[in-house]
Image (cartoon, grey):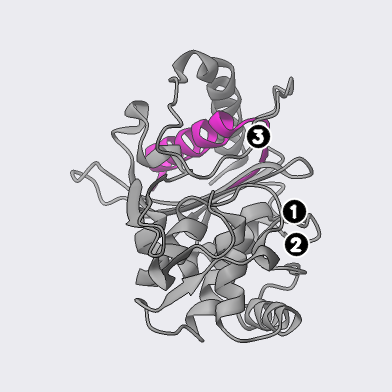
Amino acid sequence: MNMEVRRKLAGYAAIAILLWPFAIQAQTTSTTEVVTPEPVSTSTKPYVSAIVMDADTKKVLFEDNADKVWSAASLTKLMTAMVFLQYRPSWNKVVSIKSVDEVGGGRLRVNSGATMSVKDLMYSAISASANNAAMALTRVTGLKRSTFVSYMNKKALALGLKKTHFVEPSGMDPKNVTTAREMAMLARTAFTINDIRLPATTASYRFTIRNTKEIKTLKNTNDLLIANEYEDVYVTGGKTGFLYESMYNLAVRLKPTDTTKKLPNLMIVVFGAPSRAASFASAKTLADQAWQEYR
């Protein structure tokens, strides 16, 4: 892709950010169990860094500041899930949330001692980005937290990720760092694993707390799956992330809906968007332009 195309892509993304506020729909929270605060940003820049990659060949179709080291935020949970699955007990094993799992941020709103299946924890961590669920998954392996984190870093090195480093499993610490390029490689690997891909592409998940019989309904944090304005988007993997230090991060795998052309599946990472809406709008715009310019 030549420089002129790259400039056009960046320009289109910026335009999307200016237009996006008028497309935001009101959201209800009656069925949402994980809540993360939404800060107000006055920035008009669409992102700090971004990359668009052919998800099958790994060919880079667009990049902007893709090697800048940035806080991964909750995209960390993709690596947490990959390491967890190497030590996973039965998918139906009943486990509990404990006070030690509480690290702040977005959480599954249950009391300490609430019991659920390992599957419920995975969907809570990946689909709804619940930090306490991610920490519970870590604990369920029987590993010390420090040992678990060391395995996360070993896995990163095994994937060839030299600028990626983790200090804890939930994504709450801004010292969990990576780059857009390396996160694209990490997410590309994670989304090939069914036990990660399925919760990452499930718009809504319903389960029962075993010991209280309370029914929980989780909404996926990825609006590309659920918002009406993205009906033409086919998501085959996705994870959102937010910290005040990182702003809004997104890793998403998209499949083209135009079957009349031979277009690639895309792996897109957007880091540091000024709002949740901006991260989704930028990813959609970058995807549309990458497919339009694809040769």
> Marks 2 and 1: in contact by CB < 8 Å?
yes
Residue 24 visible in the current orientation: yes
| Mark 2 → mark 3, Cα distance in angstroms | 20 Å
Residue 105, above or below 143: above
Residue 37: mark in rendering:
3
In the rendering, at what x and y percent does residue 99 appear?
67, 63
Q: Residue at x 70, y 28 (%)?
A: 39
Mark 2, Cα crowd under 10 Å, few <14 / some 14-19 / many 20+, is many
Q: Is residue 204 left or right of residue 191?
A: left
Q: Between residues 248 and 186, which one lies in front from this camera angle?
A: 248
Q: Earlier in the sequence, mark 2 or mark 3?
A: 3
Q: Residue at x 54, y 48 (%)?
A: 109
Residue 26 image-quadrant placement: top left
Q: Earlier in the sequence, mark 1 or mark 2?
A: 1
| Mark 1 → mark 3, Cα distance in angstroms | 18 Å
Q: Between residues 93 and 204, which one lies in front from this camera angle?
A: 93
Residue 146, above or below 231: below
Q: Is residue 74 left or right of residue 96?
A: right
Q: Amino acid at mark 1?
A: Ser
Range of magenta residues:
268-295
Q: Which residue is mark 1?
A: 71
In the rendering, at what x and y percent does residue 190 appear?
48, 68
Residue 176 image-quadrant placement: bottom right
Q: Which residue is mark 2?
A: 176
